[in-house]
């Protein structure tokens, strides 16, 4: 009964948000609450929610102060050279821009934190997508999938969890998987190239000079190949303003997540504005050094990540904006992102709290493991890899690696399959996991990119699942799994 209700709860949630019948926050709260009552445990709803909030509170705190910190770094102009450099490399060509998104997300993912990756990637790339009228879900999908592959780094979380759960060395799990993960990353780059060509065909492309000019209140017409006609919508649901040769992008006068200015209305291409009042060019190297130090401390785990970002945000605000009024203005400028993301995290705490507290997760996992045919025993590595896709999407990494993986490893051991092989196979689903509604970082991604979570899910899931299957196929081909 709990198995059926667990799958029904997840399916109901996904259908409602993908059809936009409910907002993600409302669905994350109300759907599990109703199912908790349906299983006869409504009286314990409060306990489940408090447990879920307690588990996710450090993540919410980290995201709140990380958004403030990186928001301030965007305000002061730390990432402006990156934006200009990427734009010049991309030459306003949609193909190069999408591939650049994948490369940037993969590189920044080396710090092991998805939220940081998404904040930096969106900050750098959002103005380019907005200026050229490109689909924002292409950006979020490519960034999430690239980060998912890189999330398997030993300090990224999943590999360490697998090593802990099965009492193995993380290096023994990760190092042999490098060829397979490399194949997955190459597939992401190839996918970015294909999606970029599709965007180029749809909108054409501006010349570099046109893209660099921060005009406002203007509809730009693409100079490249023929795109869709006027009034069409991109994959993210945004209206295009195309005429003749291609689709242009409306450019407003305000700031975007990539602008850092935070003043005005609209979503203008202000990320490259060299004259915005929030810039602090004299403190550039201080801010760059502070960011490097913060990421280094995060990788070395000198302090808990929420504490690091709390200290970093306080220091960045104090040094860059010593005036109290300016500090309040900077905090207010990023309040929308903070509220949206932290609210989503605490709403997700209701979902995970009920899913775990009622026992639905355990029953679902037991059912899936029990459904494995006896003849598949010698192939438990492959089975684990396949199961890692849906299980890490519908469950937290903690639930999968500490709850399900030991059971899979035990079943594999009975058929002579080593725990190392099971552990390696268990990390192939991370490309899909990073777009799960249970991953707080994905709300940073869609929030800063101003994309509906349902649109992101509908676009990304198929590509992310395919990427995970490529990693698994490569692992089997190379004899790793």
Image (cartoon, rainbow, N blue to C red):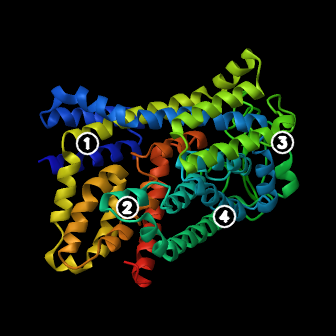
Mark nearest the camera among 2 and 4 is 2
Q: Earlier in the sequence, mark 1 or mark 4?
A: 4
Identify the residue under disc 4: 99
Using the image, tell me which numbered label, if any, was put on residue 386: none
- Considering only vertical position in the picture, is 276 above or below 162? above
Which of the 4 image quadrants contains residue 166? Answer: bottom left
Mark nearest the camera among 1 and 3 is 1
In this rendering, does residue 23 appear at all? no
Q: CA distance from mark 2 to mark 3?
A: 50 Å
The residue drawn where x is 17% and y is 57% is 366
Q: CA distance from mark 2 to mark 4?
A: 33 Å
In this rendering, does residue 90 appear at all? yes
Report if the CB atoms under discs 1 and 2 are less than 8 Å apart: no
- Badge 4 marks a residue whose secondary structure is helix
Using the image, tell me which numbered label, if any, was put on residue 355: 1
Q: Earlier in the sequence, mark 2 or mark 3?
A: 2
């Amino acid at each position: 009964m709990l198995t059926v209700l667990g799958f029904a709860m997840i399916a109901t949630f996904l259908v409602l948000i993908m059809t936009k019948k409910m907002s993600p926050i409302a669905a994350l709260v109300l759907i599990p609450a109703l199912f908790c009552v349906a299983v006869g445990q409504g009286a314990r709803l409060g306990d489940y929610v408090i447990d879920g909030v307690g588990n996710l509170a450090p993540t919410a705190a980290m995201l709140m102060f990380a958004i403030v910190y990186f928001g301030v770094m965007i305000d002061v102009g730390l990432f402006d050279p990156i934006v200009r450099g990427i734009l010049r490399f991309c030459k306003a060509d949609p193909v190069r821009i999408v591939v650049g998104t994948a490369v940037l997300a993969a590189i920044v993912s080396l710090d092991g934190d998805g939220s940081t990756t998404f904040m930096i990637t969106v900050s750098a790339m959002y103005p380019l997508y907005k200026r050229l009228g490109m689909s924002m879900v292409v950006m979020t999908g490519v960034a999430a999938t690239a980060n998912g592959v890189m999330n398997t780094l030993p300090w990224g979380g999943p590999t360490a969890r697998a090593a802990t759960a099965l009492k193995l060395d993380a290096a023994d799990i990760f190092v042999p998987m490098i060829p397979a993960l490399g194949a997955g990353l190459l597939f992401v780059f190839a996918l970015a190239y294909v999606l970029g060509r599709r965007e180029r065909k749809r909108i054409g492309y501006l010349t570099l000079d046109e893209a660099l000019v921060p005009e406002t209140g203007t509809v730009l017409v693409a100079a490249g190949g023929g795109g869709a006609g006027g009034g069409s919508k991109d994959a993210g649901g945004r209206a295009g303003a195309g005429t003749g040769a291609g689709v242009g992008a409306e450019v407003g006068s305000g700031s975007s997540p990539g602008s850092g200015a935070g003043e005005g209305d609209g979503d203008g291409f202000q990320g490259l504005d060299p004259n915005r009042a929030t810039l602090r060019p004299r403190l550039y190297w201080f801010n760059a050094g502070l960011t490097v130090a913060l990421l280094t401390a995060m990788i070395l785990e000198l302090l808990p990540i929420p504490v690091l970002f709390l200290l970093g945000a306080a220091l960045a605000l104090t040094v860059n904006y010593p005036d109290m009024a300016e500090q309040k203005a900077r905090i207010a400028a990023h309040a929308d992102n903070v509220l949206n993301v932290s609210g989503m995290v605490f709403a997700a705490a209701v979902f995970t709290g009920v899913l775990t507290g009622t026992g639905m997760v355990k029953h679902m996992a037991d059912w899936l493991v029990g459904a494995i045919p006896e003849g598949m025993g010698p192939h438990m590595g492959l089975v684990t890899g396949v199961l890692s896709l849906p299980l890490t999407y519908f469950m937290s990494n903690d639930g999968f690696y500490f709850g399900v993986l030991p059971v899979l490893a035990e079943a594999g051991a009975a058929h002579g399959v080593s725990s190392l092989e099971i552990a390696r196979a268990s990390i192939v689903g991370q490309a899909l996991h990073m777009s799960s509604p249970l991953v707080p970082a994905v709300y940073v991604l869609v929030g800063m990119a101003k994309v509906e979570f349902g649109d992101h899910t509908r676009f990304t899931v198929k590509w992310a699942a395919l990427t995970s299957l490529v990693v698994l196929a490569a692992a089997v081909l190379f004899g790793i799994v």
